[in-house]
Image: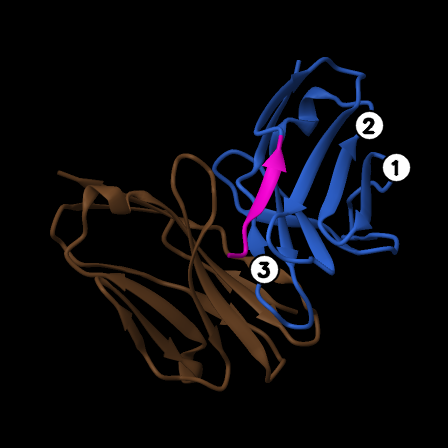
Chain colours: A blue, B brown
Amino acid sequence: GAVVSQHPSRVICKSGTSVKIECRSLDFQATTMFWYRQFPKKSLMLMATSNEGSKATYEQGVEKDKFLINHASLTLSTLTVTSAHPEDSSFYICSAREGGRDEQYFGPGTRLTVT
Amino acid sequence: AQKVTQAQTEISVVEKEDVTLDCVYETRDTTYYLFWYKQPPSGELVFLIRRNSFDEQNEISGRYSWNFQKSTSSFNFTITASQVVDSAVYFCALDTYNTDKLIFGTGTRLQVFP
């Protein structure tokens, strides 16, 4: 149980385009989803927290208009990187939590390369 | 402020050696959770353990063991008789009741050579 999927696993896009990453909880309802970013050989940094049906809460320094997060259902959250630039290239990982203080279950990650 | 420090950036050992990965945390909250995750080259985070602040009992799971000491704010992880498959980056993380977010350490890259 507690499986989280991400799609796509890898994506290459051109500078200036937008790319959407999906995060799905497959066997539970996720009231809260988290998005992390990880640069090569670096730690995971929380970008934002999203609760189903409400606006995401972004961490300091994360541009809301650049990284659009939608958590429209209890099993799906999406991260859209708008007008991508090479510096947005990174490994994006989502996690999902069923409720309360349950632990987070992590997706396999999406490697984004912007050329 | 919450903080997790993993002072060891990289560790190299030979198979069958024991290895301990250090983790020191900072928080003023009295209720918190500590975690260890493994990240193999594939990138997917593998959950290893979660420990709450009220449970200082050490834990053993196969070749893995964890030593939680509140007095030194440490949550160290030991792999006994290491194997090549243990090669990965290991992250220690902290989640406090008040902040409700995972704070990761910088990770320790473990290389186990045959």
Q: Are marks 1 and 2 in contact (CB under 8 Å)?
A: yes
Location of residue A90 (image quadrant) = top right
Q: Name the element at disc 3.
A: loop
Check if residue B102 falls in the magenta segment: no
Q: Which mark lies nearer to you, 3 or 2?
A: 3
Counting from the top left corner in percent of width and height, residue A58 is at: 80, 51
Query: For the residue labelled by badge 2, is the local secondary structure a helix, a strand or a loop?
Result: loop
- Mark nearer the N terminus (1 vs 3): 1
Measured Cα–Cα span from mark 1 to mark 3: 26 Å
Query: In the image, what residue occupies the spot 68% across and 20% down?
Result: A86
Q: Distance of mark 1 from mark 2, alpha carbons? A: 8 Å
- In the rendered structure, the answer to whether residue B114 lies left or right of residue A64 reads left
Image vertical order of residue A23 relative to residue B102, above or below: above
Q: CA distance from mark 3 to mark 2?
A: 26 Å
What residue is pinned by disc 2? Answer: A82
The residue tagged 3 is A104
Residues rendered magenta in the picture: A1-7
With B41 as the anchor, is A18 left or right in this view?
Answer: right
Which residue is denoted by mark 1 in the rendering? A65
Question: Which mark lies nearer to you, 1 or 3?
Answer: 3
Q: Is A3 colored magenta in this rendering? A: yes
Label 3: chain? A
- Disc on the earlier residue, 1 or 2: 1
Q: Is residue A24 left or right of residue B75?
A: right
Type of residue at label 1?
Answer: Asp
Q: Chain of mark 1?
A: A
Residue B27 in the image: x percent, y percent? 59, 75
Q: Have a look at marks 1 and 2 and say if they share a chain.
A: yes
Q: Residues within 10 Å of mark 3 (few under 14, many from 20)?
A: many
